[in-house]
């Protein structure tokens, strides 16, 4: 159960679905731009699309996903993996539905993240604590995310760290591309523009390399 389905996760979900004897179905809404990835390329995983309604936006954004319970009744999952997002009431409803049938729900997320809105961290933690504590297990994207969930009172032995990778492990050495003296170097950053990405650090690093190196650096930042 996700807010939306990024296209770069399709390969991962297909790999995961191939290991699920009973199948894998993803319930997700449209992206913030209203688009959907090309799910036709999926060979194993199934996708159920719901509508994302945002009655509140900004610091108090609320995301309602209509049709979540209908999807649960139809697919009838043995295990549910959901994003621990306090802005999505559908997560709490789905978890309650699973618990009433004696089934497990796992969280899967980036941790508590830095403050990016006008809501004080103390208030955010009060809201997050009961949400996080209701999961049977937690899949964290990083060791830092695991520490943040543990700081909210979630038991450490119920947290699994699955580092956020989107590509297969390389099977060969990278192609050697020596830099010609005086030739420019182009660095591209592709990703969502959020504070945890530390784009400011990337800019600073490129500036340092440009001052100390023998070649100028072009930095291109692409993101929303």
Image (tube, grey):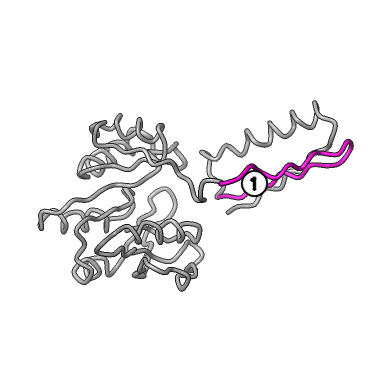
209 versus 219 height, above or below: above
Which quadrant is the C terminus positioned in?
Answer: bottom right
80 versus 170 height, above or below: below
Q: Position of residue 124 (x, y in %)?
A: 33, 39
Residue sitting at x 56%, y 46%:
170
Q: Residues within 10 Å of mark 1 (few under 14, many from 20)?
A: some
Q: Nearer the viewer, residue 130 or 118?
A: 130
Residue sitting at x 48%, y 70%:
41
Which quadrant is the N terminus positioned in?
Answer: bottom left
Residue stretch rendered in magenta on the structure: 171-191
Query: Label 1 belongs to which residue?
Result: 189
Q: Nearer the viewer, residue 14 or 65?
A: 14
Q: Quadrant of residue 176?
A: top right
Residue sitting at x 79%, y 32%:
210
13 versus 115 height, above or below: below
Query: Which SS does the magenta portion mostly show?
Result: loop
Q: Position of residue 57 (x, y in %)?
A: 42, 56
Magenta includes 156?
no
């Amino acid at each position: 159960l996700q807010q939306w389905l990024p296209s770069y996760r399709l390969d991962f979900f297909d790999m995961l679905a191939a290991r699920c004897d009973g199948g894998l179905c993803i319930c997700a809404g449209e992206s913030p731009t209203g688009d959907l990835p090309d799910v036709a390329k999926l060979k194993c995983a199934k996708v159920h699309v719901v509508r994302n309604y945002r009655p509140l936006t900004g610091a108090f954004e609320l995301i309602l996903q209509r049709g979540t319970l209908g999807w649960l009744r139809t697919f009838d999952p043995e295990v549910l993996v959901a994003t621990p997002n306090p802005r999505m009431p559908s997560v709490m409803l789905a978890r309650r539905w699973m618990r009433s049938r004696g089934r497990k729900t796992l969280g899967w997320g980036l941790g508590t993240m830095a403050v990016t809105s006008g809501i004080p961290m103390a208030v955010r933690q009060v809201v997050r604590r009961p949400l996080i504590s209701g999961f049977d297990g937690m899949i964290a994207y990083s060791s830092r995310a695991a520490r943040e969930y543990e700081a909210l009172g979630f038991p450490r032995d119920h947290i699994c760290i699955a580092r956020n990778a989107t590509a297969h492990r390389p099977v060969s050495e990278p192609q050697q591309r020596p830099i010609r003296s005086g030739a420019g170097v182009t660095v591209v950053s592709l990703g969502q523009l959020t504070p945890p990405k530390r784009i400011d650090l990337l800019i600073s690093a490129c500036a340092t390399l440009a001052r100390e190196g023998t070649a100028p650096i072009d930095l291109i930042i692409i993101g929303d």
